[in-house]
């Protein structure tokens, strides 16, 4: 297997804070790798160094194999806000769009040699199909009305445009930083399927564990400044990591036992020590270093009480709301009960965040009634993130809410102690909120929500920018949370672990209540769609009387003709099924240009064959 990327001795620091130092690794063709590490250890910085956006601090080398095409998807892509969608994507096609422009200029110039060169360049990069490919990929990502300006797009739509730009580059090596952020679940599953089928080499950072489990075949983990490689997907990584830690702990325990015996020897009388071998004294200090290793990892500690919750939580009766002509909620009635944990899913723009704003009273419905219990104390974690003043520090943010926090066992702890539980050590207290990383801001925001001791948590996309370690702790807390939960999330793993039934936003303000976890809902939907396809196929079969008439006509044919007719009918069905499959593939937007061309050519041949066979079928039936 050819090596695609070799990295040697790269480092990154910000001020006195070292993110990583002396990192090196190799990536081979076909590897699909997820990079896992806590927030603040430089995952995004590492990807940007590999993509050439940033540079290593102290030399080092990033070497891609010659002629490898590399595409980088950043967490946030800077677009020209005034460009239309199609023009913005077209402008980012690099060699393909420049080849098209040169060809157009060459034709206008009439220079035969220039035209020949431009034609060769078009052939090399397949510039002929660029416009078609852009339309196809944008359509597959559910981006329509391509004349809209980029500034008019939602965060989810802008992320899909960035994905389209990445996919259209047809790169050999993809570097993706949180590719699932701001995407609805349908698009995540489409991207998951695309990357599973793609032959590209991949390195990505993602907190979506189902996504990386199904896409990746290797895990890179940064642990205590060291890069550890695990072969296998996320589930296999967890098992191998546990085994590795068990072995390390066994070695540490063994070193500590040896250390006790060596310590007795090294502390023996000075007269005896003069004759001790120097190598053994040196080995003692090496052993001391090994025995001092701690496998303790710093994780967020969520230890906070929830307020008492009465019988009435939120009662909704015939609640409706619209934005202009757009119906967001249509006659919704529901009584929330204590301890229930509801997940909310649906396409971007279906009204999920609007629904949460109505539940919390931020938006007044057009009609209907929303009643909230007297003891209800809502903790609302909004997708927009934390709000803060210019110059506001981490400590300011917390102490403005409370000087003390009530823990789950009834004790009170200081706000500063609570900060340390959320991995904000004393040296960060006076750090400005605006210079925190995205993950640190999200962690601080979660802290400010929980320290108010809510008895109902309403969380809008809480997993964005949180690392996997923090998500694991949050999931455990929410599983034990005695109040009520209402969670909007595109993270299927998170939903499966924290919710027990779903509100599914199906469009036009309609909400379907599904009892079960998200994985169960997807299985239910797959079975329902299979039944619908089966029913549609059955409806296309000829009626019994028609079949009897056909059979009677067949009996009038000679044996040879009857066999021919049966053969033609079987072939027509086979050709029709193949045509239907190819048409589905063409409309899916997942085919490369070569596959697209082959599929189109095959459909033309199938249509010709069907025409010929149907004519013969008619002749025999006459």
Image (spheres, rainbow, N blue to C red):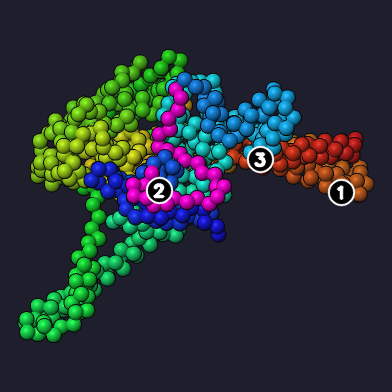
Determine crowd level at label 1: few under 14, some 14-19, many 20+ residues with C-alpha closer than 10 A.
few
Kindly report which numbered mark, 2 or 1, lies closer to the viewer in this rendering. 2
Q: Nearer the viewer, residue 37 or 492?
A: 37
Determine crowd level at label 2: few under 14, some 14-19, many 20+ residues with C-alpha closer than 10 A.
some
Say which mark, if any, is on residue 209.
2
Answer yes or no: is residue 197 visible.
no
Kindly report which numbered mark, 3 or 2, lies closer to the viewer in this rendering. 3
Residue at the image position 45 percent from the left and 18 percent from the top? 326
Magenta stretch encompasses residue 61: yes
Magenta stretch encompasses residue 151: no
Disc 3, disc 2: CB below 8 Å?
no
Q: Residue beneath label 1, please? A: 563
Residue at the image position 45 percent from the left and 27 percent from the top? 79
Magenta segment: 55-81
Instruction: Note whether 509 is above or below 13 in the view shown.
Output: above
Residue at the image position 39 percent from the left and 41 percent from the top? 54
């Amino acid at each position: 297997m050819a090596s695609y990327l070799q990295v040697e001795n790269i480092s990154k620091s910000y001020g006195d804070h070292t993110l990583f130092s002396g990192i090196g690794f190799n990536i081979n063709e076909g590897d699909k790798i997820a990079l896992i590490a806590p927030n603040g250890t430089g995952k995004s910085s590492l990807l940007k160094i590999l993509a050439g956006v940033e540079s290593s601090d102290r030399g080092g080398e990033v070497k891609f194999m010659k002629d490898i095409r590399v595409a980088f998807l950043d967490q946030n892509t800077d677009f020209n806000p005034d460009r239309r969608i199609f023009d913005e994507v077209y402008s980012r096609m690099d060699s393909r769009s420049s080849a098209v422009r040169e060809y157009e200029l060459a034709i206008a110039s009439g220079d035969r040699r220039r035209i020949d060169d431009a034609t060769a360049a078009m052939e090399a990069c397949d510039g002929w199909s660029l416009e078609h490919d852009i339309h196809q990929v944008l359509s597959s990502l559910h981006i329509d009305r391509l004349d809209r300006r980029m500034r008019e797009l939602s965060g989810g739509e802008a992320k899909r445009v960035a994905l389209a730009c990445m996919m259209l580059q047809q790169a050999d090596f993809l570097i993706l930083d949180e590719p699932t952020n701001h995407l609805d679940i349908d698009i995540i599953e489409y991207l998951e399927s695309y990357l599973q089928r793609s032959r590209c080499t991949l390195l990505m950072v993602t907190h979506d564990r189902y996504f990386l489990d199904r896409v990746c075949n290797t895990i890179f983990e940064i642990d205590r400044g060291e890069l550890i490689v695990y072969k296998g997907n996320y589930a296999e990584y967890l098992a191998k990591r546990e085994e590795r830690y068990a072995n390390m702990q066994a070695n540490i325990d063994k070193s500590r036992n040896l250390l006790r015996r060596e310590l007795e020897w090294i502390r023996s009388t000075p007269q005896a020590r003069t004759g001790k071998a120097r190598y053994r004294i040196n080995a003692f200090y090496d052993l001391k270093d090994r025995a001092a290793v701690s496998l303790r990892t710093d994780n967020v500690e969520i230890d906070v009480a929830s307020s008492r919750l009465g019988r009435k939580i939120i009662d909704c009766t015939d609640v409706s709301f619209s934005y202009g002509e757009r119906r967001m909620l249509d006659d919704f009635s529901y009584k929330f009960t204590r301890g229930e944990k509801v997940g909310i899913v649906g396409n971007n723009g279906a009204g999920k965040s609007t629904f949460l704003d109505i539940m919390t009273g931020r938006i007044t419905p057009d009609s209907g009634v929303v009643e909230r219990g007297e003891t209800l104390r809502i903790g609302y974690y909004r997708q927009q993130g934390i709000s803060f003043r210019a110059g506001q520090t981490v400590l300011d943010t917390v102490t403005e809410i409370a000087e003390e926090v009530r823990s789950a066992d009834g004790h009170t702890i200081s706000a500063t102690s609570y900060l340390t539980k959320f991995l904000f050590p004393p040296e960060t207290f006076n750090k400005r909120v605006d210079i925190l990383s995205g993950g640190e801001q999200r962690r601080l925001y979660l802290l400010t929500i929980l320290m108010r001791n809510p008895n109902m948590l309403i969380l809008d996309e809480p997993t964005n920018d949180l690392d996997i370690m923090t998500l694991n702790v949050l999931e455990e807390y929410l599983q034990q949370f005695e109040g009520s939960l209402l969670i909007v999330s595109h993270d299927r793993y998170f939903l499966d672990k924290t919710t027990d039934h779903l509100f599914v936003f199906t469009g036009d303000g309609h909400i379907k209540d599904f009892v079960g976890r998200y994985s169960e809902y997807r299985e239910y939907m797959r079975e329902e769609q299979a039944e619908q396809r089966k029913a549609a196929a059955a409806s296309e079969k000829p009626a019994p009387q028609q079949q009897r008439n056909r059979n009677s006509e067949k009996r009038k044919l000679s044996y040879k003709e009857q066999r021919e007719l049966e053969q033609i009918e079987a072939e027509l069905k086979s050709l029709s099924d193949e045509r239907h499959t190819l048409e589905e593939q063409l409309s899916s937007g997942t085919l490369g240009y070569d596959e697209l061309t082959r599929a189109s050519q095959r459909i033309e041949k199938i249509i010709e064959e069907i025409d010929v066979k149907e004519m013969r079928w008619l002749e025999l039936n006459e």
